[in-house]
Image (tube, grey):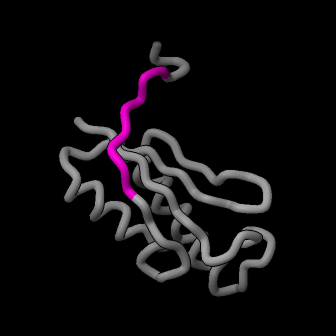
Amino acid sequence: MAEWIYFLHPPRPDFAATMTDEEKAVWGTHFARLQQLLADGVLILAGPTLGETNTGVAVIEAPDEATARRIMEEDPAVASGFATGELRPFQVALLRGRD
């Protein structure tokens, strides 16, 4: 199974501190979806970068780019237009607890 990383680029640098109620609701749905992907064995890790720019990062497993792209594009943050997604092939080289 191939590994992929996708980045969620928010609409503004201070997004975490300035989210509207509508954005907060979408991010709650986004988080619940990530929890489901984790439970399903698709998600390896996810989280935001901290500081002024809060880029989201998700590492997933998918059999091919089309599937990985679909997972990213169906992310509520991307699907709602509140974030743009950027997908790249990825390889987990070291993982605490696995290696």
Residue depicted at 61% across the width and 59% down the height: 55
Where in the figure is residue 18, as x and y percent of width and height? 78, 78
Left-right relation of 51 to 93: right
Identify the residue shown where x is 55% and y is 20%: 96
Q: Is residue 27 above or below residue 97?
A: below
Q: Which residues are magenta?
A: 87-94
- 33 vs 20: above or below: above
Residue 91 lies in the magenta-colored region: yes
Count of marks placed on residues: 0
Query: Which residue is pictured at 53% across the width and 51% down the height?
Result: 57
Which image quadrant is residue 10 in? Answer: bottom right
The residue positioned 78% from the left and 61% from the top of the image is: 52
Residue 95, horizontal then vertical, whole percent: 50, 23
**Residue in front for this viewpoint, 41 or 84:** 84
Looking at the image, residue 16 sits to the left or right of residue 63; the answer is: right
Looking at the rendered image, the quarter that the N terminus falls into is: top left
The percent position of residue 36, horizontal first and vertical second, equals 43, 54
- List the single residue furthest toward the top: 99
Of residues 16 and 7, the one drawn nearer to the viewer in this rendering:
7
In this view, 10 is above or below 54: below
Expressed as whole percent of the image width and height from the top left, the position of residue 31 reads: 55, 61
**Residue 87 versus residue 73: which sits nearer the camera?**
87
